[in-house]
Image (spheres, rainbow, N blue to C red):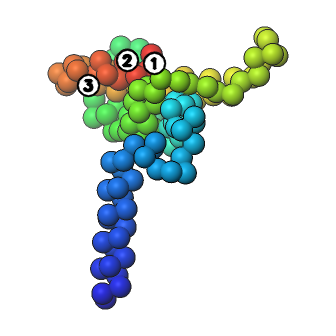
Amino acid sequence: MMKIRYTIALVAIAGLICSTAPAQDFPNVNKALADNAALVYWQAFSLLPEFNDAEQETLDDLLDGNQPGAKATKTVRRANESLRLMHRAAKHSQCEWGLEYNRGAEMGLPHLSQARKLSRLACARARIRFSEGKNEAAIDDVLAAVF
């Protein structure tokens, strides 16, 4: 029983340390990569939920101007972790996707469809937040979607 308490305490302390210390304070963090927003966006993309047809229709209706309701709020809430990461990424000063610019018009943009999904979700949440009178949070969502 004592080992379990000790382990839980260590995990809690490690979580606090890791969540509050900036990446550059850790000796093994590649400082050149730590400020690359693209790495955070990829994390956000990987956590995007899959929406069924009804949920997608709810999102489309919301973005087409319909009033948000409980169904839309519940649907958008499923993407909160991706949206949190999007806000984090938007604060970075650099964003290098590692694209093959030398390919010109044939350059692949593998992140584009996921970025579009994430931006649409941010706009949907902003619409919900505006309807709830949370204007500052809504504006933050719109700005994060743009940057």
The residue indicated by pointer 1 is 147
Is residue 88 visible to us here? yes
The residue indicated by pointer 2 is 143
Q: Is residue 91 above or below residue 5?
A: above
Figure quadrant of the C terminus: top left
Could you tell me which secondary element the residue under label 2 belongs to? helix
Tell which circle, 3 or 2, labels the residue nearer the N-terminal end: 3
Residue 146 drawn at (x, y percent): 45, 16
User: Contact, CB < 8 Å: mark 2 with mark 1?
Assistant: yes
Q: Is residue 124 left or right of residue 136?
A: right
Q: What residue lies at 32% left-to-right and 79% top-to-bottom? A: 6
How many numbered tags mark residues here? 3
Q: What residue lies at 31% left-to-right and 88% top-to-bottom? A: 1
- Give residue 65's quadrant in the image: top left
Could you tell me which secondary element the residue under label 3 belongs to? helix
Tell which circle, 1 or 3, labels the residue nearer the N-terminal end: 3
Q: What residue lies at 47% left-to-right and 23% top-to-bottom? A: 93
Residue 83 drawn at (x, y percent): 41, 34
- Give residue 109's quadrant in the image: top right
Is residue 49 visible to us here? no
As drawn, the label of residue 63 is none
Q: What residue lies at 30% left-to-right and 79% top-to-bottom? A: 5
Q: What is the CA distance from the residue labelled 1 to the residue labelled 3?
A: 15 Å
Q: Nearer the viewer, residue 77 or 1?
A: 1
Q: Amino acid at mark 1?
A: Phe
Q: How busy is the neighbourhood of tag 2: few (under 14 within 10 Å), some, or many (20 plus)?
A: some
Q: What is the CA distance from the residue labelled 3 to the residue labelled 2?
A: 10 Å
Q: How busy is the neighbourhood of tag 1: few (under 14 within 10 Å), some, or many (20 plus)?
A: few
